[in-house]
Amino acid sequence: MQQKNKKRKGGEILRKVVIKVIVGVVLFFVLLIGLLFGHKTVPEGYVGVKYQLGAIINTNVSTGWNWHVPFIQKIEIADIRQQEYLTDQAAYTRDIQTVERIQIKLTYSIDSSQIDYIVRNIGITNIESKLVVPQVASTLKNVISQYRAEEIMQYRSAIQEEVENQLTNSLSLNGINVASLSILEVDFDDAFERTIAEKVAAATMAQTRINETVIKEEEAKQLVIAAQAEADSAKIAAEAEAYAISVIQEQLSSSPQYTELQKILRWNGEFPQIMGDSINPFVMLEN
């Protein structure tokens, strides 16, 4: 009986040891799996999105090491740094000319506050293919179609600004921030480019001639003004002289002594060599 009790106790101890070993092994493997698969590093410039059985439970997982339950939870990272999208597009102008190649560079970034919307409706990996690519193509073609072919080069900066403004508005509705847009190159058919260059040169020459004509007209106006001023001055001088003569004549007619005064004022202090009157003329001889 005692022997049976000892065997029973020995069996229970063994079972307990086995259970402990099994539990220990399970915990070890759980810990190992957790160490290997239960963490995710979110680097700087990224934001983490945590899922649990496919459902989003956190869209703002911070940078650094982050733990999650293996096989039940997972963390995906989204790049919120500025991205560059470079593309070549063709378009038609308002006068149905083909722009063979317009090279565009778009710099953009994900709005971290809109990560939840982007993940649920677009997908982090689909941002460029679903949003950026079609929006750039449609916006560029729409803007280019409003200009005639020879205006494309003339108003290039205005076109670039208009495309950037439209993309900023449309992409912001889907959680994308536009930093800048640049039109790097615009290529037409070689023959058409020569035609445009000739038209631009002719327009420049015509404007130069207009400017020269304006300058000559202004110079002519200045000459007329100067001549008029000179004539007015001569007229004033003549009027002044006429007035002076009239005053003198008035004085002569009203005062005979005025004549004698004028003689005295004009006398140089020398006597004439011949003097006389109507009765006894005489000659004064020098010694």
Image (spheres, helix red, strand yellow):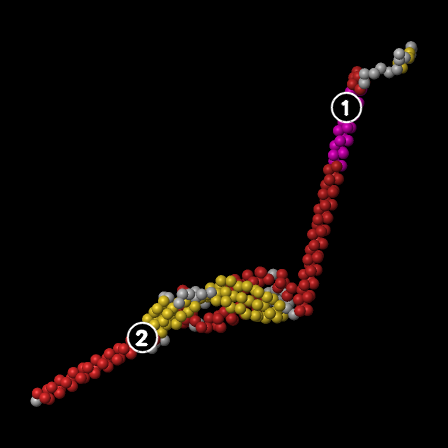
Badge 1 marks a residue whose secondary structure is helix
> Is disc 2 surrounded by few (<14), some (14 to 19) or many (20+) residues within 10 Å?
some
Q: Amino acid at mark 2?
A: Gly
The verdict on residue 239 being magenta is: yes
The verdict on residue 246 being magenta is: yes
Residue drawn at (16%, 83%), measured in percent from left and top? 13
Q: Nearer the viewer, residue 137 or 85?
A: 85
Residue at mark 1 to residue at mark 2: CA–CA distance: 126 Å
Residue at image mark 2: 34
Badge 2 marks a residue whose secondary structure is helix
Residue at image mark 1: 247
Residue 208, visible in the rendered structure: yes
Question: Where residue 104 sits in the image (x, y, percent)?
Answer: 55, 67
Residue 187: assigned label: none
Question: Where residue 234 sits in the image (x, y, percent)?
Answer: 76, 34
Q: Is residue 277 above or below residue 222?
A: above
Residue drawn at (40%, 70%), measured in percent from left and top? 77
Residue drawn at (64%, 68%), measured in percent from left and top? 188
Tally of numbered discs: 2
Residue 185 appears left or right of 274? left
Magenta-highlighted stretch: main secondary structure? Answer: helix
> Is disc 1 surrounded by few (<14), some (14 to 19) or many (20+) residues within 10 Å?
few
Residue 4 appears left or right of 210? left
Residue with the most extreme top position: 280
Residue drawn at (90%, 12%), measured in percent from left and top? 285
Question: Where residue 145 sits in the image (x, y, percent)?
Answer: 59, 67
Q: Amino acid at mark 1?
A: Val
Segment tinted magenta in the rendering: 231-253
